[in-house]
Every structure is written in C-alpha cells, then in structure tokens.
Image (cartoon, coloured by chain):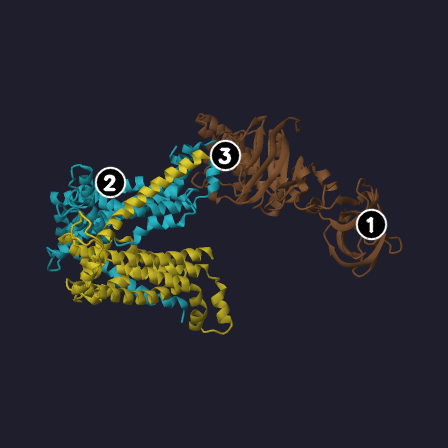
Chain colours: A cyan, B yellow, C brown
Amino acid sequence: MKRSAFAGPYVVWMILSTVAPLLFVVYFALTDRSGAFTLENLAKFVDPIYLGVLWRSLYLAFYCTVICLLIGYPAAYFLASKDFARNQALYVLILLPMWMNFLLRTYAMMSVIEDTGMLNNFLKWLGLQPMEIIGTEGAVLLGMVYNFVPFMVLPIHTALKKMNVRLIEAAEDLGAPPAQVFYRVVLPLSLPGIVTGITMVFMPAVTTFAISRLLGSGNFFLFGDIIERQFLESNDWNFGSALSMVMAVLILISMSLLNRVDPKKEGSGAY
Amino acid sequence: MARINLKKFFKGTYLGLLLAFLYLPIVVMIALSFNQSKSRAKWGGFSFKWYLKLLERGEILDALRLTLVIAVLATIVATVLGTLAAIGIHAMKKRPAGLIMNISYLPMTTPDIVTGVSLMLMFVFLRIPLGFSTMLMAHIAFDTPYVLFSVMPKLKQMDVNLYEAALDLGCTPLRAIYKVILPQIMPGVVTGALLAFTMSLDDFVISYFTSSATEKNLSMVVYSAARRGIEPSIYALSTIMFLVVLVLLLIINKRSSLENVS
Amino acid sequence: MVEDTRLIELIGVSKEFDGTMALDNVSLYIRKREFITLLGPSGCGKTTLLRILGGFEMPSQGQVLFEGKDLLPIPPYKRRINTVFQKYALFPHLNVYDNVAFGLKLKKLPAAEIGVRVRRLLELVKMTGYEKRDVEQLSGGQQQRVAIARALVNEPEVLLLDEPLGALDLKLRKAMQLELKAMQQQLGITFVYVTHDQEEALTMSDTIVVMKDGHIQQVGDSKRIYDEPQNAFVADFIGESNILDGVMLEDELVSFCGKKFPCVDSGFAPNEAVDVVVRPEDIMIVGEDVGMLTGRVVSLLFKGVHYEMVVEAGGFRWKVHSTAMQPEGSRVGISIVPFNIHIMHKQLEPDAGEDGA
C-alpha cells in the first residue's frame, strides 16, 4: 500500500462534507421550490430592502475593520517592540480572546452596555445621564470591534516579529529618522500582516448574525440575520442559498482584491 | 534613559488599556455570576446560588452532555482522519498535495454561516434528520483541518530518511508509520486534538444550523437565553465555559511554545 | 594613503551585556583613509565595537570621538558612517535600484541626481543592469555588492563592514577581498572591517586590531602582527605556530625541550617562565647529527607548495613547513636560528590585553 493512500478517507470526507455542501448552496440558489432552474432568487435580492441591509452590513464591517486596524496596529507594534517582545504572558493574554466563544464575549459585552448594565450604573454613580447604547448600530459596532480586534493584532504581530531587526538598523544607518524608518521599512514589510488582519476581521464582521441580534436587540438586520431568517424562520431556502452565495462571492471578490495589494509594488510605490 | 522609560511606559499603558477593554466585560460577567442579588446594579453578597441553579435546569445539563459527547467523538474521528491524511499528503507529489491543502483551507476561509447553511441544505436534501448525528458530522468536518494543520509541520520537520531507514531495516510500511513516524509527530497530533476539542466545545454558528431545536449545545443555550435577556445563571454557565476553554488554551499554548524551544 | 589625522578615537570604551563584558576598557584610534580590521574569534567584541561606531549600541562606559567631537549622542541616521551588514540586510520589499537609492531619497535629492549616483555606484560594484531585480533573487555575491553600493552611495566618511564576505564561497571571497581593497583606495574613505579570518585581515588591512574576550591584544600592520606577535594568543591566531613552555635563563638565552637556545629577546626576569613561539616555516630540517634537536617524522602532508610535517622531537610535536620532503618515520634533526625564536610573557588571565592599545 502506498503511503499517500492514507489521505484517501480524508479526501473522500472533505469532498462529502465541505465541497458537496457548497455545491448544494449553488444548486438551491439557482432553483425554485419545485427544483426547476431559476434566477428569481438572485433577482429577489435586488430590492431596496435587501440592498439596504447589505449596505449596512458592509459599512459596519468596514468601520469595524478600520477601527480594529487603528487599535490593533499600535498594539501589535508595541507588543513586538524590544520592550515587550519577551513578555510572552502579555502576548497570550491579548490573543487569548480570539479563541474564546464570541457568543460568550458578546454576552459579556451586553451586560456592560445594557440600559441597566455596568456602564450606565457607573455613569449614574458619576451623576451623569445614562446612555442608551444597546439596540443601536454603535452597540453592534462596539461588539464587533470587541470580538475581532485580536484577529487584527495576531497577523500584524507575526509579520512584525518576522521582520529582521537589521533592516531597521540598516534604514537608520542610511539616514532615516524614526518616522521614516516606520514609513519606508516597517509599514511596507508588515503589509502582508495587515492584509491578513483585514481579512480576518472583515469576513466575520460582514457575516455575523448573533452579534447584531444580541446587541442590536433586533432593531435592525444585518446580512447574516436575513440569511439566518430565510433558513430558520421564513423557510425560504432557495432565497437563503442565493443570499449565501452572494455573500460568499462578495467575500471572494474582496479577498482577491486584497491579495492583489502586492506588498512588493506597494512598498516601492509608497514613494 | 528616562526617555526610553517614558516610551515604554506609554506602550505599556496602551497595551494595558487594550487588555482592560478585552477583559473588563468578562471580569464583570464573572463577578456578576457570584452576585447574590439578581440585579446588576447592586452587589448582594457572594454566592454560588446561580451555579447551583444550573444543576436544577435539565436543559443545561442536557446541553452540557451533548457538547461534551460531540466534542469527544468529533475529536477522536478528526484526529485519526487528520493524522492519516497528513501522513498521506506528506508522501504525495507537490501538485495533488497542494490541491488537497487548498480544499482543507476551505472550511477556515468560508464564513461560518455559509458552512453551516451548506451542511444543513445537504442534510435536508439527503433526508438526514437534523440532530445529534448531523451536528457530529458537521463538527468532524470543521475539526479535521485543524488536526491536519497541526500535524503537517511536524512531518515537515522530520528527517526524510527516517521512514526509509525503517523500511531498510525491515519494517513493513504500516509498522514503519506506527513505530517511526507516529512517535515523531505525536506532539503535533496531541496539539491538533486539543485544538479540535476546543473548537468543538466553542462552536455556535455551525451547530446552530446543523442541529435541531431539541438538540442544543451549550453555546446554543446561551444564545437563546441571551435573546430572552440577561439571566445570572447564564453568567455562571458562561464563566464555567470560559474557564474550561481558558485552561485548554493555556495547555495548547504551553505545548506549542515548549515545542518551539526544542 | 592613510593620513595621520585621527578620525575616530575610542577612549576606555566598555560594553556590558547582562553581566558579561563584551568590551572591556578598549582604547583605539582610527585614522583617515585607513583600512582597519578588527580581527578575533567570535565573542571577542569586534562586532560590538563596530555596532557602537554605527550607533546601534551605546557603550556602558567610555568616550567615542569623531573628528574630536563626541559621537555618542548622535543617532545613527545623522552619522556620516554607513554599514554593510553581516547578512546584508537588504530591504526585501525594494528592488536593487530602490535599495541603493534609499539613502538619497531620504535626503530628498532630485530624481535625476539620484539616478546618476545610483548608476555610478552600481557600476562601481559591477551590478549595472540589475536595477529592476528583486533583491531576494540575487546570489550571495550580488547581494553583497548591492549592500556595498547602498552604503557607499551616501558618501560616508567611514564604511563599517561586518564580516561582509562570510557567506561567500572561497573563490568569490578572494576576489571580493581584492575588489574591496581597490574600492577603498579609489574612494579614499576609511573602512572599518570586522572578520574572524586572519588571512583576510592580512591581505586587506593597513592596520589590524587583534581582539579577544573584549580586550585588544595587539594593534599593528600585517607584517608586524605576523612577524612580531605580542603574545601567544596573537601568534596562534595569526598563522600557524608552535607554542612551547620555556624558561628565560638570561638575556638572549632560553631553555625549552631540555636544551638551551640562543635567541634575540631580552629584558625578562631571570628564570621567568615564558611562551616560546616558532613559526612552522622557520624550522629547518637538517641531518640528525647536526640538529639542535633530533626526532622522528610522524606525519607528512603535501599542501601544494610545501610539505606539512609533524616532527616529534624533545618531547614536543613540531609543526614544520618545508619544501623538502622527509619520509614518514625517518629520523631528522631540526634547527632554528635565534632570530626566529620569539619569546613572550606568559599571558596572565584575563587582563593581559589591557596595555594592548
């Protein structure tokens, strides 16, 4: 028996459990209830209501990604710097939430920003007006950032750690003051990490349904919510599949656009 | 020197604030799980009462049982499947190996909701009733690549001649794998298994779509409870889940950092 | 040629890393247009010294002057000193042209001038035509050239080179040694060169600084370092040597291997225990009957130009280089002229090198 045959069961299993289901999505998206071919499901999506939901998902995910980048880049940079590079505990602490159930963390966030939650109690204690945060887009955005910021820190940190310290010294040696070292060497070399970070934040942010349901109190829908509704409430699987397909395609397109940001070209094109 | 310390202080403060942002809600929730009073506004004294309440709720105990059984079974199957796959792929030529690795990335790069929905569609289409077995299959599907990706680097680190040396010394291929390759990649197998177990314990979205309303895992119970509003016993449940995952992750982290040293 | 003006001066420089002294009270001056080589085994402090000059390390103690002014408060990016790093440290995100142009772009020079200067430097290092190449696709030797061009394009006063030829194969290394030396003479700037390869140091340098354990052992030109090593370490590190224990009986008379030998050194205490150093090529093989010592050839290797023999005589295994061959096992006599017997004080560990600079 050849050794490569050991992969056989896995290959069969992956085709059955990963590839085939995705084909089912396509099949359902392009058929009606009787199983006949139709484009109606896709056409149904071109409706101001759904496009509005898509738009809201996109801009919330976009804001979330930008905020995560703004918070996460300095964090990754400081964490990789000489002062903290040996602090393994700090690194683990910042990345640990990545692996923790996002639902639980969303739930924890909920108990902080709720109308009678910890934050408002604190404001009251200070003698300030309580804020109505929960149920707003701001709350959903906060929840997304809270959940996804470690996903931005990790890849950027990895890219920065991989960078040879001698390169920074070489830049200084050639006359670059700190700001120029950052702009001309550190930033372009960490670009692959940034791209991965954006992917890892944007994708779950644009597809989430639970965060919006819990922190948005169901006041508005995101794209993930309407997909979930098609399957578990309205039972319109064909339309749900069409929406899933649209989402998968959107993500594929944005990923390939991002990967097009060739670090090499970007680095030299930066000046 | 003073300026350098100021810089370090600034960096430290920034990272400290980030940590506070990440952990404050969790700490608040853990604290509230020990709060005697149901109100979140005032501290009614320390109490285990919400933890005890958990035990009274059959729904939660059932969910716990289901979560653990699924996690254990999925981990066992995924570990066997993933380890064998890694050994097989390692022996393949570059092109087929690359293709299989790319397919393995699929569950990681497809949004969870799409993975969940796609599995649900297939199960329903094939008239497999949603419930325990479908949820188990779904978990095996997303767990297996984690094992594969943990084992693969260990195989790459291994001396390529080891396997051939074993054959040369008279081992059959199966024996060579069992006697020579497996001990070498064991650390990767264990890490992969722990990772798969954690992922399975932790999963919500995929379970949500591939299970039925009666077969709920802990995450699903938390979700439906959270939609109804805040409940201190759910805080207690979340605290326990947090701690379990935390311990598992610390073990995984410790293992992989030890391996990096050696 | 080397000018007499002192360009850089190190005064009592020490550097401590976590309790170990990488440099211990080192004083040294570097002259204008000098090709100076810091030579020593790994861990001797040579790279630390170079990094202090580059501005990447701060000494724990001591002073560094550049043209008489304190160099230490000046950050690396303001120093008129450039570095060729050990593994080149080329920017992987930039092509050859942009790597070399890096320093000039920072100075905001007009693009046309940058172009002229980059091309001139690429010509100097024989890399014309490689402008658009990705640096990671270049061979080690080519990367080396780009690194040199990148450092030189800024027209530094001093070029620091940290084992720049270490990653190259022997033939390329030899060729680059000559090229570097020619380049330094053509440009008329100071080179501070770090290496552990004594042959490289001897070929290229105006001045060699031999270092060990953070101390300078000896400073001098190639000939002096080779012919008049100041202690057994230098003698052993530079070229091959026979090093024996001996006793200085009186001025110009030393005893080793149970015999007395006339020599040319004096000024030692009577009966002082000393190191006796004899270069293998300074030992003459003579007839058994006329030798100062007699012994037996225990091994023989042909090395191309000469034979390398080991002769066991007087209880010591002598390394001998000779163009005349003596078969293994034959009995021979060895003879050394007084001028070739070098007498050195025993090294007192570990502070022996302090007077070195």
Q: Residue at x 40, y 35 (%)?
A: B6
Residue C158 is drawn in which quadrant? top right
| Nearer the observer, A145 or B9 | B9
Task: Name the image quarter holding the C terminus of chain C.
Answer: top right
Would residue C122 be visible to someone looking at this image?
no
Image coordinates for residue B164, horizontal then vertical, percent? 49, 67
Is A122 on the left or on the right of A167, as rendered? left
Please state which amino acid type lies under the numbered disc 3.
Asp
The residue tagged with tag 3: helix, strand or loop? helix
Q: Residue at x 24, y 61 (%)?
A: A20
**Mark 2 vs mark 1: in front:** 1
| Nearer the observer, C146 or C314 | C314
Please state which amino acid type lies under the numbered disc 2.
Tyr
| Nearer the observer, C114 or A141 | A141
Other-residue count near label 1 (Cα within 10 Å), few / some / many at <14 / 14–19 / ≥20: many
Image coordinates for residue C237, horizontal then vertical, percent? 68, 46
Circle 1 residue: C255
Circle 3 residue: A173
| Outermost residue toward the front in this view | B45
Task: Name the image quarter holding the N terminus of chain C.
Answer: top right
Is C157 on the left or on the right of B133, as rendered? right
Please state which amino acid type lies under the numbered disc 1.
Ser
Other-residue count near label 3 (Cα within 10 Å), few / some / many at <14 / 14–19 / ≥20: many
Chain assignment, label 2: A
**Mark 1 vs mark 3: in front:** 1
Circle 2 residue: A63
